Image (cartoon, rainbow, N blue to C red):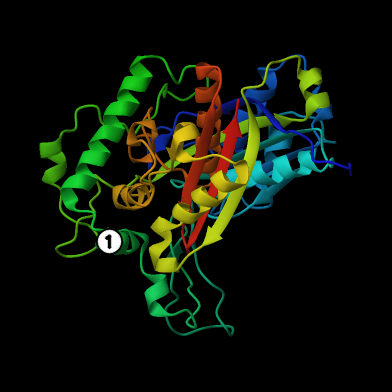
Amino acid sequence: MTDRLRDVYVVDAVRTPIGRFGGALSGVRPDDLAAHVLRALVDRTPGLDPARIDDVFYGDANAAGEDNRDVARMAVLLAGLPVTVPGTTVNRLCGSGMEAVIQAARAIAVGDASIAVAGGVESMSRAPWVVPKPERGFPAGHQQMYSTTLGWRMTNPRMPKEWTVSLGEGAELVADRYGIDREAQDAFALASHRNAARAWAEGLYDGEVVPVDGVDLARDESIRESTSAEALAKLKPVFREGGTVTAGNSSPLNDGAAALLLVDEDGLRATGREPLARIGATAVTGIEPQYFGAGPVEAVQRALKKAGRGFDALHTLELNEAFAAQALSCLSQWPGLDPAKVNPRGGALALGHPLGASGARITGAVAHQLAAAGSGTGLAALCIGVGQGLALVLER
């Protein structure tokens, strides 16, 4: 332990291209995806002895299949790092990847580590079906099988029904509460796809995306460059008759992984590199579960207050786009924020939302954008199922 908190720096951040559900990455195990970004991250800093990594933190939202038994530790072993490097896996659902960054940064700040890797992984394609054990042997009736891909399952009957609505119905509820209409949602989704396509065309992701060996996928697979307002308007509501939430203004199901290299001053000297950014304030908040989409509203405000910053100070804000209605509900509560600073390179509606990886992806995205700008303040935030919000400030 130290007498004061240490500064924590992001030296580098990488991610895979994000694959569609059942798409190009569906044949790759999640532990292999996690190992891939870990290996790539280490290889990009040849001056760093991997044995100096004090811990590896990974977020993983489902962890019911091949990513069971601590996928962070599995990634360390599969990536060929020394067996002396430990690893731990954390779960805050959609916020898991950012939670991993926060926990790694906290360990460094208090002196428990000098160098750490933080990231996240999810293969929604390979999430298994599960069957609970019967309460007694040799049941005569049928057993219920559950998909572990997304959302509530095996729900405790003591939970109030209004808390356990589907994620899509939760998006409808925030659209109702904040007055977000269908036209606005579709327009937001269209902008996300156009911004993502433009960012790729301009090479803005070249410095952070590391394609997976043996897979024919060079860029994010869910981007629809040819979509239009007219095409989006033709889609039917998915979650409620007469609703406004469609497949076109919701994030898709995805596969992917991301990782960041975090260090203190001594670790920075060991890497021999200039940092992308410095970790600043963080905040986590809770909200009624059915209104999970508005979770970032208070978390972002608290993180900015801790950092002594206002919305006018932000160079960029990466807000994970679980649903257009959800993102727009948050933006409506931040009147001091310039919308042009939000997800300038596209968001999850276009890039994809591999649950456990998304928090690490958007944190790395902010770090790279600040490095490209040369200086500034950035913020990353996510809504989280079951009613939470998570935010993290970065500085350069």
Residue 140, image x and y in percent? 46, 85
Does 303 sit above or below residue 6? Answer: below
Name the residue: 61% across, 38% down. Answer: 119
Which residue position is annotated with label 1? 172
Other residues around mark 1 within 10 Å, as few (<14) / some (14–19) / many (≥20): many
Front-most of residues 260 and 354: 260
The image shows residue 239, relative to residue 270, as above or below, that is below
In the picture, which quadrant includes the C terminus?
top right
The quarter of the picture where residue 109 lies is top right
In-image side of 274 versus 47 (left or right):
left
Give x and y (percent) for residue 189: 26, 40
x and y percentages locating residue 79 in the rendered image: 69, 30
Quadrant of residue 48 within the rendered picture: top right
Quadrant location, the N terminus: top right
Q: Image check: 97 left or right of 141?
A: right
Give the SS element for disc 1. helix
- Residue 221 as seen in the image, left or right of residue 82: left
Q: Is residue 135 above or below residue 286?
A: below
Pick whichever, 227 or 104, lies toward us.
104
Q: In the drawing, does residue 82 fall left or right of residue 375?
A: right
Q: Tell me how many marks there are.
A: 1
Q: Position of residue 214 (x, y in %)?
A: 50, 23
The residue that appears at 21% across and 64% down in the rendered structure is 240
Viewer can see residue 13: yes
Three-letter amino acid code of the residue under disc 1: Glu
From this view, report whether residue 272 is shown above or below residue 85.
above
Instruction: Look at 45% across and 31% down and name the residue there.
Output: 316
Task: Report if residue 58 is visible in the image.
Answer: no
